[in-house]
Structures are given as C-alpha cells and as structure tokens.
Image (tube, helix red, strand yellow):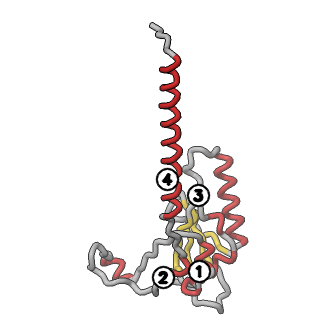
Amino acid sequence: MIKEITDEEEAKINDDNNQIIETKVETDADIKKKLNEEIHKIDLAEIDEGGNDVKEEDVGTRRLLKGFKHANIKIHLMSGKIQDLIIKKKYTSFFDAAILSIHSANMIDEPINTIFKNGAKIHVETADFLCILKPENKTQYREKINEKCVAAKWKICKDPPYKHHVLYEVVKDETATPKVE
C-alpha cells in the first residue's frame, strides 16, 4: 500500500538526508586528515644493514641444521630490488648460488654478475607450470631466458636437478675471482 506524505514529512526526510550526508562528509574529511598526519616515512638508505656476520645460534627460534654447519652453508633470503644489491659493495662477488623467480628473471643481464662469484650456479625458474600460458608461450619464455643468460655470459648446465628450473653457471674473467668449487 502506498501512502501519500505531507509537505512537512517530505521536508523532514530531506533534512534527515542532508544531515546524514553532511555528517559523512565531515567524517571522511576527519579520516583523511588523520591519515595524512600519521604517515611515517622510512628512508631505507639510512638503515644500517650490518655486516655479514652470522647471528648467534640456538638463540630464540634460530636453529641451523647440523649438515649446514658442517658444510659451512649460509642462506640469505633477499627481498627488494636486485638493482639495489648490484650497487652495494658488500654484495660484490658474494653469492655462490642463487634462485631467480619468474618475476626476477627480467634482471638477467651482465651487471647482475657483480653479485655472483665466478662459477656460481643460478637456478632460473621457468614458466612451464603456469596454467595461463600456451605451450608455445612457455617455449618462447625459455628461449628468451636463454638469450638473456647468453648475453650475461652464463653457461647452461646439463641435467638440472629440477625440471621447472634451468641451471646456469656464471662465467667471469678467471683472473678476477677464484672459481667456486
């Protein structure tokens, strides 16, 4: 059933709607003001990264497997931009091995060699298991990765341990750094 409203009732409804809209606008403005006031900017360049020292073992949740201790293996999980690592002196000829994901494979170029030791093994992830790609696109991706690796002077290794990675070896000038064994 439809009921007709009077002019007074209509005016009251319009006033109520205007108050709701005005309150919402004020609330949005207050929220934006708070958000702008509470922004804390962090300059990553000012943060001291510390040395390459391994932290004390068996402290808190930090545990190193015995096999890693005996083999003198250290694992560095890296995040951020590869370009930032390339320019830092502490990472010059630092890594014996690396795994490059699909997302970081675009960085394969000769400048990235600065962070790897001569003879470092590099696993480059392929697109073989991406469902969204057609088989010919997967092949093209592998070909493009191979082109980039050849341009970076990396040598392909036979029989990689994983089928979804391609294994390469960094080949640098033999006189620059000793080869990783």
Q: Circle 4 is placed at which residue position? A: 30
Q: Circle 3 is placed at which residue position? A: 126
Residue located at (53% from left, 18% from top)? 7
- Asked if labels 3 and 4 touch by Cβ distance under 8 angstroms, the answer is no
Residue located at (43% from left, 76% from top)? 75
- Asked if labels 2 and 1 touch by Cβ distance under 8 angstroms, the answer is no
Labels 4, 3: front one: 4
Residue located at (53% from left, 68% from top)? 99
Q: CA distance from mark 1 to mark 2?
A: 16 Å
Of the 4 image quadrants, the one containing the N terminus is top left
Q: Circle 1 is placed at which residue position? A: 115
Above/below status of 47 relative to 131: below
Labels 2, 3: front one: 2
Q: Circle 2 is placed at which residue position? A: 49
Above/below status of 139 relative to 159: above
Q: CA distance from mark 2 to mark 4?
A: 38 Å
